[in-house]
Image (tube, coloured by chain):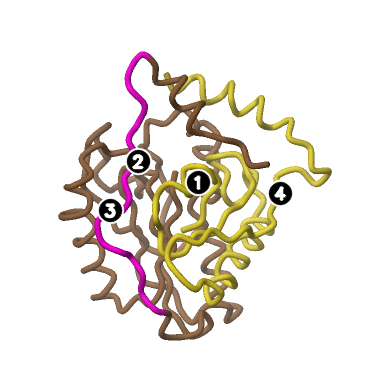
């Protein structure tokens, strides 16, 4: 599994879980960014041999903002509020 | 620190009770038999996605699945999932279903081969027993028939 919601991933026992610190719904990057899609996917596949047991979550080191900003979280909360 | 989604989901679903998260009843661990570079790989997506000519998913408790050709040229991807976060991935489904990137990695030899099909189903179903006893075994059967070595689930 490759996912963006670490808290949810930690509550379901998946055989191998790779975490990317992106907004939910953008697991492989922003729209139309093919190089980034490929980088994230390649990192996830490269991690496969390193899992030892079910339930482990490995952080792929993929951050959404190059400067480490987490401003995207507020935008995402607003977006998710439309899910009511 | 990673964003916590469960409180947001609980707040947005109120006054309905929060969604129940369920782990598989049996341990789901399968040893890796081959290097990734020799493996046939498939994507599994819970975005309820399909090609335009395939039967649409029915919100919200549709427990069927679609086989989506792994060839990126096979046609446009439609996302039927009802989630509010769908606005962005519907602009570019590749950000939740990296069909093109997977094909590129096959060309480069990063993976051994593409499975002929990827698979998609509706995420967020509440009938957990049906998922474990009907939906998952049906997809596993298709994966075995296609001799898939490695399946990567992308939750939506």
- Tell me where residue B86 appears, x and y as whole percent: 48, 34
What color was chain A assigned in the picture?
Answer: yellow
- According to the picture, the residue beneath numbered tag 1 turns out to be B93
User: Do the residues under discs 4 and 3 have CB atoms within 8 angstroms?
Assistant: no
Left or right of residue A53, residue B59 in this image: left
User: Do the residues under discs 2 and 1 have CB atoms within 8 angstroms?
Assistant: no
Q: Secondary structure at mark 1?
A: helix
Residue A78, labelled with which disc? none
Q: Nearer the viewer, mark 3 or mark 2?
A: 2
Check the residue under mark 1 and report the chain it is in. B
- Tell me where residue B56 appears, x and y as whole percent: 27, 40
Q: Real-space Cα distance between discs 2 and 1?
A: 25 Å
Q: Between A34 and A81, which is closer to the camera in this rendering?
A: A81
Secondary structure mostly taken by the magenta-highlighted segment of the chain: loop
Magenta stretch bounds? B15-31
Quadrant location of residue B114?
bottom left
Q: Nearer the viewer, mark 2 or mark 1?
A: 2
Q: Earlier in the sequence, mark 2 or mark 1?
A: 2
* Residue visible at 16% across and 55% down in the picture: B133
Residue A63, labelled with which disc? 4
Classify mark 1: residues with Cα within 10 Å, few (<14), some (14-19) or many (20+). Answer: many
From the viewer's perspective, is residue B63 above or below residue B149? above
Check the residue under mark 3 and report the chain it is in. B
Q: Real-space Cα distance between discs 1 and 4?
A: 20 Å
Q: Earlier in the sequence, mark 3 or mark 2?
A: 2
């Amino acid at each position: 599994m490759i996912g963006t919601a670490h808290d949810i991933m930690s509550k379901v026992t998946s055989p191998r879980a790779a975490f990317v610190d992106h907004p939910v719904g953008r697991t492989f990057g922003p729209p139309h960014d093919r190089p980034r899609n490929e980088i994230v996917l390649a990192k996830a596949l490269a991690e496969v041999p390193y899992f030892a047991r079910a339930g482990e979550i490995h952080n792929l080191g993929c951050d959404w903002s190059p400067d480490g900003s987490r401003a995207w979280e507020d935008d995402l909360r607003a977006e998710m509020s439309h899910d009511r | 620190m990673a964003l916590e989604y469960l409180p947001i989901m609980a707040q947005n679903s109120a006054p309905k009770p929060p969604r129940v998260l369920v782990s598989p009843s049996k341990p789901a661990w399968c040893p890796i038999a081959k290097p990734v570079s020799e493996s046939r790989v498939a994507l599994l997506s819970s975005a309820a996605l399909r090609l335009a000519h395939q039967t649409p998913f029915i919100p919200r408790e549709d427990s069927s699945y679609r086989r989506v050709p792994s060839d990126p040229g096979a046609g446009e991807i439609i996302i039927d999932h009802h989630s509010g976060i769908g606005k962005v991935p519907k602009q570019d489904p590749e950000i939740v279903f990296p069909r093109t990137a997977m094909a590129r990695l096959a060309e480069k030899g990063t993976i051994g081969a593409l499975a002929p099909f990827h698979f998609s189903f509706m995420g967020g179903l509440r009938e957990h027993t049906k998922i474990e006893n009907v939906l998952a075994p049906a997809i596993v059967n298709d994966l075995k028939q296609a001799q898939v070595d490695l399946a990567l689930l992308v939750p939506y």
